[in-house]
Image (cartoon, helix red, strand yellow):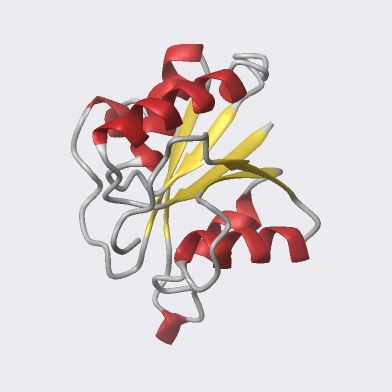
Amino acid sequence: MRVGITGYRGLSEITEMLVRGAMWELVTTYGPYELVGVTCLRPGPETWFAQAVREHGGGIEIIVPAGGGALPAGEIAREATAVHRLAPVAAGGLGDDLGRALVGMVDEVIAVWDGAPDCEPAEVAALARRAGLWVHEIWPDGCRRPARD
């Protein structure tokens, strides 16, 4: 099962604890050898998800935007089973459209978000649903939305 992640960045420590707990519960519902987490590995939920998938025994694939430059440093990036570098729009690629790239690579999406419109997680969740993908929304009671996503 290929599962992608989107979510707010800049979450508080309390929200991080709540989200990590809910994310672990979800990740462990998949068999460790069937799970591939697809992430851009940005700070926050995308990195927490990758850590949970690796701790559970799954694999990680990383999406790097055309303008993104170098692969993020760290153990997770070194252990990734694949790195997908998006081609620039001028070359016919998706450029920096991480949401469309993610939705095109996965079977399900996890959205760490409170359901509010007009933000990146809302856009990715809507794309996924239009593509017929299941979207798992993670936003436990007690979480607080950041000032910006």
Q: Residue 83 at x, y = what percent?
A: 41, 45
- Residue 138, placed above or below residue 79: below
How many callouts does the rendering have? 0
Residue 49: image quadrant is: top left
Report the residue at 39% width, 71% height from top: 96
Quadrant in which the C terminus appears: bottom left
Q: Residue at x 30, y 34 (%)?
A: 77
Q: Does residue 30 sit above or below 92 in this rendering?
A: above
Residue 101 coordinates in the image, percent (x, y): 54, 61
* Left or right: 57 in relation to 77: right
Q: Which residue sits at x=30%, y=45%?
A: 11
| Residue 5 image position (x, y, % from top left) | 51, 44
Q: Is residue 69 above or below residue 141?
A: below
Residue 117 vs residue 77, the one in the foreground? 117
Q: Is residue 101 left or right of residue 82?
A: right
Which residue: 50% across, 59% down? 121
Q: Nearer the viewer, residue 123 or 13?
A: 13
Image-quadrant location for residue 76: top left
Observer-nearest of 64 and 17: 17
Front-most of residues 41 and 25:
25
Q: Looking at the image, which residue sits at the far front?
A: 142
Q: Residue furthest right?
A: 132
Q: Residue furthest bottom?
A: 90
Quadrant, the N terminus: top right
